[in-house]
Amino acid sequence: MPCTTVLVGKKAANDNSTMIARTDDGHFDEKKLIVVTPKQQKRKYKSVLSHVVVDLPDEPLSYTASPSVDPSSGIWAATGINAAGVGMTATETITTNPRVLAADPMVVLKKAKSRREKEVPGGIGEEDILVLVLPYIRTAREGVLRLAALLEQYGTYESNGIAFNDENEVWWMETIGGHHWMAKRVPDDVVVVMPNQFGMDSFDLDDAFGAQTAHLCSADLREFIAENHLDLNQNGVFNPRNVFGSHTDQDHCYNTPRAWFMGRCLCPRRYRWDGPDADFTPESDDIPWAFVPERKLAVEDVKYLLSSNYQGTPFNPYLSQDTGVRGKYRSIGINRTGVTSVCQIRDNMPVELRGVEWICFASTTFDALLPVYPHVDKMPAYLANVTLDCSTENFYWASALICALADHSYHRCVQHIDRYQNAVMSKGRQLLREYDRKMLDSGDYSLAAEANEALAKMAKEETTRTLNKVLRVASETMKNGYNRADN
């Protein structure tokens, strides 16, 4: 899935929370936000795409998920927070190279060609991973270890990056070929940027094979690298991106420019981003995986990064003048995004209030980020009852309509969009503050459901108001417009 991920360590956040965020950029997949209760979680899972069957443990935790509305290709649960206050986003599709794939091929479904043959299931993938892992973990590290065991047993048919967070830690995990993997604890003071490439550019193998304080990997990874001559690094410095990743021409228009834009937002003065003496250009292969930001980040900053269309650069596709490179690079805020979430795990809060899931449907450039409490039995109908047919009665379709209309008349709609996004964010924060106080004072955490209904009601009012405005603008700028005085 062509997505973009941002990870925020707790000392890099304005409120000491950890955050993992990702745009789920499918093929205009209709998405919804639901809660899966322990009774609803199956004990035997079968993948639609790979046909692999996995027995699941008893006593799962409840968790939120953003599955596809159309289940014909599988669940694709995407992102969520469980009842233990652990967040997960799965997955960021990443790249690899032929040397890795030759040494450890992907585990793909082999269908029977005749009645005499038996079908050979494939491995697990993005369709499956969140459902197989999130209900059964109580820390971010446990998430890495559970998924690692599944990868080693069943393998995978694609290259993926997966993030986990709890109140103290953020972990990032990347698959290597069909069965191998590595994972790193994100340092508390950094922000990680991930644009569909193998990301990690440093890794402590001694720690991974020793104390495992902040690094974990497959038990045979050293032998795997040596036996297959995978290490391309010089001077004894181990850079896993050079070993397992890619450096293709497609990366330079599709992937690295996104990291470049996010880096220039995080560290505008520390590095030179433009001109002949730039430290990094949009096509640099060595843009850092992690940055210590020049100022701490709030949720609004994460949303801004994930809404990018190269604002302030000549690559912005919405520029009125042709710069010669306008629209050259793949934007982060893209038309086919189904859902974007920020899984925020807050510090020093009861487990019932620890998690806040910020959700945005359709293109992040135009749509609003809404917070909800995940520790509930069900989500409001406006978020959960999404249909395959277009309807303004749910957040997904109303958001998608705003995108299509505002894009058509960008310069006349951008003020409406700014006001819409700020209104939902500010009113959402106000409701969170109000209900945080109520629940902390009373100890009645069931008020979270009431809070979510109030948040959804507010979002519907603001979304409908904005939809009315952008529809009017788009109607006024139709090509068949004509007045009698025009002749």
Image: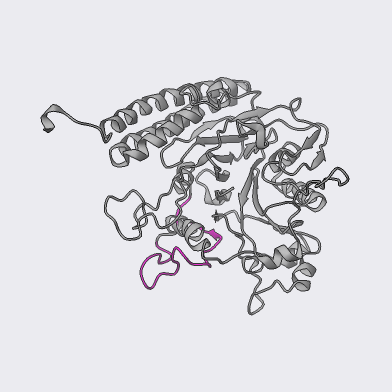
Instruction: Identify the residue shown where x is 43% and y is 49%.
Output: 308
Nearer to me, 180 or 298? 180
Nearer to me, 225 or 134? 225
Instruction: Identify the residue shown where x is 41% and y is 36%.
Output: 403
The answer to whether 110 appears left or right of 240 in the picture is right
The answer to whether 287 appears left or right of 48 in the picture is left
Q: Is residue 117 above or below residue 339?
A: below
Instruction: Identify the residue shown where x is 81% and y is 40%.
Output: 53
Magenta span includes 286: yes
Q: Can you give x and y, in whole percent of width and height, for residue 234 in the image? A: 63, 78
Image quadrant of residue 244? bottom right
Is any atom of residue 422 visible in this view? no
Q: Can you give x and y, in whole percent of width and height, for residue 328 in the image? A: 40, 58
Image quadrant of residue 266? bottom left
Main SS category, magenta section? loop
The region drawn magenta spans 269-296
The answer to whether 443 appears left or right of 281 in the picture is right
Work out which quarter of the rendered image holds the C terminus and state it. Answer: top left
Instruction: Identify the residue shown where x is 77% and y is 59%.
Output: 218
Magenta span includes 212: no
Residue at the farthest bottom position: 235
Nearer to me, 474 or 114? 114
Is any atom of residue 373 visible in this view? yes
Q: Can you give x and y, in whole percent of width and height, for residue 96 in the image? A: 64, 61
Q: Can you give x and y, in whole percent of width and height, for residue 281 in the image? A: 43, 66
Number of marks in the rendered image: 0
Nearer to me, 466 or 117? 117
